[in-house]
Image (cartoon, helix red, strand yellow):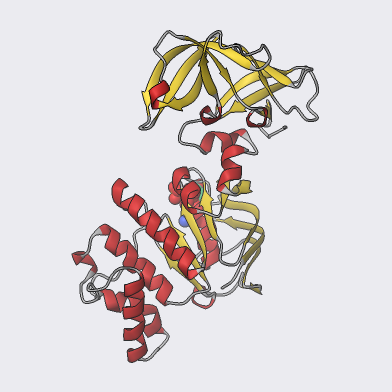
Amino acid sequence: MAGIDIEGLATVYPNGVRAVDGLDLHVADGEFFALLGPSGCGKTTLLRTIAGLENASEGTVRIDSADVTRTEPGKRGVAMVFQDYALFPHMTVSENITYPLKVRRVAASTRTETAERTAAELSLDGLLERRPGQLSGGQQQRVALARAIASQGKVLLLDEPLSNLDARLRLEARTFLKKLQRDLGITTVFVTHDQAEALALADRIAVMQSGKLRQLGSPREVFARPSNTFVANFIGSTPMNLVDGVVEANGSVSLVGGSLPAATGSVPEGAEVTVGVRPEYLTLAPAGSGLQDGESIRGEVVVAENLGTSSLVSVDCDGTLIGVTVPEEDEPEPGAPVVLTAPERRVLLYDKESGELLA
Ligand code: ATP
């Protein structure tokens, strides 16, 4: 088992694109770590640079404290699973799983034993003599994982491991992967563009934009306290409400339709800010519910969208739509006058220019 230390890392392609642009990152021993960000932000390039499949242009990569920046991929102690699994179609499942061991000239008897043990761990028993073409997508994905695990790398690198599976299988595979990682305790870095997947699986998430790190934290932290409006917009299945506001003297912030309590910290009275509140943290009540000025905003229900057990209600507050999630049974009628409020610690203030979290 091993940690990964990345310092001042940049990966520049021959065409001049700085796909990874000055990155510092520590992945702890045994951690399940997600690289998350929109298409083209450099996640795959970062993963490939850790694996040694791309050359670092600047900075260092350490695995288990050893500097591997110039070490060839096969000698870094990493096992990688590619998005398309990269299984050998002419080989059996057993041969696929033990291929890395064969390359290292491990004895046939040990290979057979490893194949059987790994297949059992990954629920592939009984499939060892099949070829990849005779397997379902989920089974192929598990063979690719089995091969990576059987190679006994110190760290496991997964490039969009679930993206080739259909929605239902993906959920199943997600649970399987989380349990497997926990049981094996192997340091794992996985790339995904799916924020829900990162939130569900990872111990910590690095959110990337244009080759740079925008936030590093636990799923809870990046969800509840995004450190900038980019992360606020990217994380969450319903987008965070981001609206203009002005800081008031009494520890509140005025915005469309009223004001909300806010921990304003060192942000001075009168400062113009972007106010961020997640729909999940707002509560909705019929107008006239006794909420004081300074702790609520008024509006009118426009429409409600069913999300399964909850509903996303759009409320028109002085011409701006604010989203609020409510239990399905509390869904209000369109046109109903309502008030919205949120606890002080859920009301975030961002710099209007830079989008960075102020308080
Ligand atoms: P996706 O989710 O779409 O796979 P990503 O976040 O993994 O995106 P990368 O594939 O790492 O992003 O690409 C980062 C940037 O580097 C992009 O601008 C991309 O166009 C560029 N890029 C990727 N591979 C190469 C290459 N071989 N040569 C030149 N530029 C590249």
Q: Quadrant of the N terminus?
A: bottom right
Give coordinates of residue 95: x percent, y percent.
29, 79
Q: Is residue 14 visible?
A: no
User: Residue 190 in the image: x percent, y percent?
Assistant: 48, 57
Could you tell me which residue is drawn at 64 percent across and 19 percent down?
A: 244
- Residue closest to the eye, 295 or 303: 295
Asked where in the image residue 143 lies, by quadrant, the reply is bottom left
Which residue is at the front of the view, 140 or 294?
294
Q: Is residue 338 visible from the viewing direction of this image?
A: yes
The residue nearer to you, when weighing 291 against 212, is 291
Q: Residue at x 42, y 65 (%)?
A: 180
Relative height, residue 252 to residue 178 (above, below): above
Q: Residue 207 at x, y = what percent?
A: 57, 46
Where is residue 94 shown, x and y percent of the image?
A: 28, 77
**Which one is nearer the viewer's eye here, 123 or 237?**
123
Q: How many numbered discs, if any?
A: 0
Name the image quarter holding the C terminus.
Answer: top right
Q: Quadrant of residue 23?
A: bottom right
Question: Residue at 60% across / 67% down in the picture?
Answer: 29
Left or right for 109, reference 277:
left
Q: Residue at x 42, y 54 (%)?
A: 160
